[in-house]
Image (spheres, helix red, strand yellow):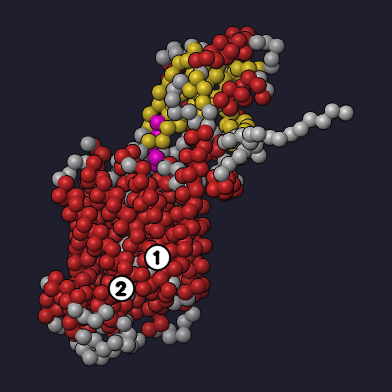
Amino acid sequence: MEDKRQMDKATAAGILVAFGIIFGDIGTSPLYVLKGVTGTNTPIDANVIYGALSCIIWTLTLQTTVKYVILILRADNRGEGGIFALYALVRRHARWLTVPAIIGGSALLADGIITPPISVASAVEGLRIIYPNIPTVPIVIGILTFIFLVQALGTSTVGRAFGPIMVIWFSMLGTLGLIHIFDDPSILKSVNPYYAWWLLAQHPGGFWLLGSVFLCTSGAEALYSDLGHCGRGNIRVSWVFVKTCLLLNYLGQGAWYLGIQGQTLGERIPFYELMPNWFLIIGITIATAAAIIASQALISGSFTLVSEGIRLNFWPKVRLVYPSLQKGQLYVPSVNLLLWLGCVGVVLYFQESARMEAAYGLAITLTMLMTTMLMAYYLYIKKYQAWGVVLFLLVYLGFESSFLVANLIKFTHGGYVTLLIAIAIATLMYIWLRSFQIKLRLTEYVKIDQYIQPFKELSRDISIPKYATHLVFMSNAARASEIESKIIYSIFQKRPKRADIYWFVHVDITDDPYTMEYKVNTIAPDDVYKVTFRLGFRMEQRINLYFRKVIEDLVKNKEVDITSRYESLSRQNVIGDFRFVVLEKFLSYENDLPFSERIIMDIYFYVKGFTTPEDRWFGLDSSSVKIEKVPLVIRPVENVKLKRIYS
């Protein structure tokens, strides 16, 4: 309850961070949305302007405000948001929910590769009004490089730095729009949804304009992904101001359009036409800064998504950095590098923001559709009224399917780039999940109880050199009474490992992001113990530190004696040494796997070679860790036709 109150609380500092982190993408849409709708060579028609603005107003209301800000922000997982956090809340109820989670997550990551380039390119190209021949590509790549370099500082620092700029940006949007509404107040008619219906149903080709209209809400999914960085209360309070300023600016642009009916737009940029000449340089500077900041929303959202994906077995174990003690702050170096490389590639491929706009929005509609499916299931298991759940599903599936169909015309104009990236990411997620399931299904476990006597005898067998005073094995066995047969093999057969006390440590990742719990099972007092850590999917796995805390608690409660059992050291009360053993699996040649599973496991082990080693992932001290490679024999080859020859 305390966490919920904290989430719903709005503070001045929190609102400022929200402005700086999550509203950049949706906030810079006035730069290009209406220009995309009307085109540059088609004569301006007043009814089309009314219809386009009506579509924008009701899209921002139904899609962003009602679906995301009011409804979906409720579906937080202890303060965390995003499609994977939503999946974590519902995954135990139906296995098929994995499909929308993977599709939505991969599409969102793919969108994170095109959002920064289009935002920055749109801004930098505005400088052509002053410097017509300025080369934009090197400038765009330089700015993108700077943005990705500052991510290591953490989203709190970035948000505080960018927040004031975005407040100025939105204030400018609202002011410019409000001034121009008075040029032709009849533009306010576009609030009537009739004009939206007319554009989509009666205007020739009007339906396909939805592809451009959709860009006004493309940042809504990032708004949900960044919930953990900002908090629900801060997002909701700041959205009131953001939406007001956005609508005023769109209406102001619409009023300007009504003044040029019958003409074509040509090279004019409607957004900059709202500015008086003396303000143009200032306006372009602020717009450039805001568009640069716009890339932040999906970058920080991508970090959250990947960290959640790791815990849900959708993503390889890569290094995670927590730049501050503030809850929700996160930086993923490998993802930061991949996004930077992807963004630079997009800039070099498309060159111009106009070409990026033609490709933009296709992937994110898939994410929104998948979020709708998961949210409907969440409402269902939370016992909401059945008619309400069905209404939500029908309204938003229809709404977003229309956007998806309208966006499909972008496929040949570059939309295939983001879809190909999304397919590659989804394939990696599927392989990672499938390989985890294969390993889990076929790993052999044994009861610890049946080895209690052998453990005691090995511990007291002075004919075998002592391997460690305390020998700690990392185990995947979730049940307190079991361990992997490979561990037994390592202790008794590979090279007998004599120790005074044997510890088996298992880490259980919970769907609750911030769980910090442990339990101890005493298998044999002063001989064998099993420790199970229950850690949330957003918690850093610092097992060295946590295990030391467990030992301190056990010693304080007189549940274990960790003093060295060497007589000379015992008299001095010297604490025995601790040694960790991590079993690292590799695919054995002695396997008779189906072709598809062989491919999956080969790719899994190949990619795993580039990721964080198990000991570093668990946060173990490398000086006291032994890595043992063990073959993963999934299905031994049978019926070997080998014939003996007698001489």
Element carrying mark 1: helix
Nearest to the observer: residue 96 or residue 421: 96
- Looking at the rendered structure, the kind of residue marked 1 is Thr
Which mark identifies residue 646? none
- Position of residue 445 relative to residue 358, above or below, is above
- Seen as rendered, the residue at the extreme right is 647
Nearest to the observer: residue 134 or residue 104: 104
**61 lies left or right of 574:** left
- Position of residue 442 relative to residue 503, above or below, is below
Percent coordinates x, y for residue 336 in the rendering: 48, 56
Percent coordinates x, y for residue 455 in the rendering: 57, 14
- Tell us which disc is closer to us: 2 or 1: 2
Q: What range of the chain is rendered magenta?
A: 534-538
Residue that numbered label 1 is attached to: 115
Q: Residue at x 21, y 71 (%)?
A: 55
- Position of residue 574 relative to residue 191, above or below, is above
- The quarter of the rendered structure image containing the C terminus is top right
Q: Main secondary structure of the magenta part?
A: strand
Q: Residues within 10 Å of mark 1 (few under 14, many from 20)?
A: many
Percent coordinates x, y for residue 637 in the rendering: 63, 36
Q: Earlier in the sequence, mark 2 or mark 1?
A: 1
Residue that numbered label 2 is attached to: 212
- The quarter of the rendered structure image containing the N terminus is top left
Element carrying mark 2: helix
As for residue 93 lying within the magenta part, the answer is no
- Looking at the rendered structure, the kind of residue marked 2 is Ser
As for residue 537 lying within the magenta part, the answer is yes
